[in-house]
Image (tube, rainbow, N blue to C red):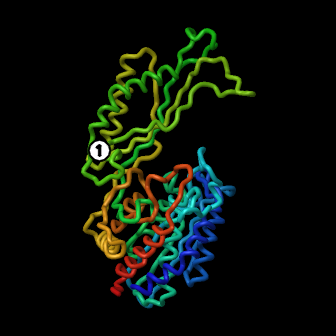
Amino acid sequence: MNSLFNRIESKREELISFTKELVRIPTVNPPGENYTECAELIGQRLKKRGFAVHYERANNSPGDSDIYPRNNVIARFEGHSSGPCVHFNNHIDVVVPGKGWTMDPFEGIVSDGKIFGRGTCDMKGGLAASVIAIEAILEEKIDFYGAIEISGTVDEETGGYGGVAFLAEKGFFSKPRVDHVIIPEPLNVDRVCLGHRGVWWSELETFGRIAHGSMPFLGDSAIRHMAAFLELIEQKLFPVLEQKKTNMPVVPVGAKKSTLNLQSIHGGEEESFDGMPSPCVPDSCRIIMDRRFLIEENINEVKAEIIDLLEELSNTRPNFNYQIRDIMEFLPTMTDKNSKVVKIFSDSIKDILQKTPKHVISPGTYDQKHISRIGNLKECIAYGPGILDLAHQPDEYIVIDDMISSAKVMAASTLKLLGVNS
């Protein structure tokens, strides 16, 4: 392996350059900008290195349009004879930069051994590391059975429907095509991530009656009805969630509990010119709720906790009317720690990094949910070089040495999964 690792070390500047190229394509989702350009950057690079490259647009998936096409890229390199397939799946979309940056979020600035920019950590740095790892194997001319695949997929940040879910429905993440999937999400270089907590996103709307704002007694404020619900979850639900604990190895520690995030709130008439409000009693108020739950919980019970509070208000608060709509739900996912892919990556971390590998669970979902439920493929983990706490933060960065280390782990583990022992 020494020659292979030396090869990866020699590609440090290439790794940095490729990461910067990826960051400089602002694939912001929503709405899903510049997906085609980013997919083609990956595809053109891998085609030059002998991969068969295929582009797949997720027609009619959520958000897909001629302005924002959901274009994915899948590249495959065949070994000298049949055998297992190892697939590195990387999402190419990033969240909005947000406020608080001290530098251009899409420049890819290198400083103090780090690359800064939106998506460096989550997860274009991991994408670049996986590409460099496989390129090093090919440049070393190491014979192997089977195949290696690398994909760049879209929309992970908004559920993955136009990316991995769409491709999984078409068989891209099922046997016999694929045997092992590694997703380079930012879970830290010495950790193997087995899966994630469950998620239920929902939209709740309360209703009122419009009236003149100077005479609110003639109307019925939907915002006040929503406020009553928010007060009830403060009093009754949040204390219950605090008491729920899991045996899943979720990180960070705060995520070992059940959580509820009130993601957004919208109420009343929109402001008009110069921010002037409409003088009306609001007849509608909506909130988006993000509930993350544990493997020990049942999804029906999770929903009932909310519904029961709403029904309590319906029975006790005059004129309280509501409707609730499911947006997205996925059950917790956890790969067996004794599975082949987990054992091999754990051994590689121990041998290469001289660290005791940790098995963890992600606090948020990622595309393993689709590979498990649609592709029915259980040999799937997340392993990547990014630091989890930096994801979606201002001044996001990735440590270059961690990218090199993770590329070594990826390369060595890939060869072992393909049956190459030295």
Relative placement, left or right, of 389 versus 219 is left
Could you tell me which residue is drawn at 65 percent across and 62 percent down? 24
| In front of the other: 347 or 178 | 347
Could you tell me which residue is drawn at 59 percent across and 64 percent down? 110
At which x and y percent is residue 337? 27, 65
238 in relation to 245, above or below: above
Could you tell me which residue is drawn at 35 percent across and 63 percent down? 191
Tell me the quarter of the picture where residue 260 sits.
top left
At which x and y percent is residue 22? 60, 65
The secondary structure type at the circle numbered 1 is loop
| In front of the other: 338 or 256 | 256
Can residue 236 be seen in the rendering of this structure? Answer: yes
Tell me the quarter of the picture where residue 147 sits.
bottom left
At which x and y percent is residue 329? 41, 47
| In front of the other: 419 or 399 | 399
At which x and y percent is residue 243? 27, 37
Circle 1: residue type: Asn
Relative placement, left or right, of 1 versus 207 is left
In the picture, the quarter occupied by the N terminus is bottom left
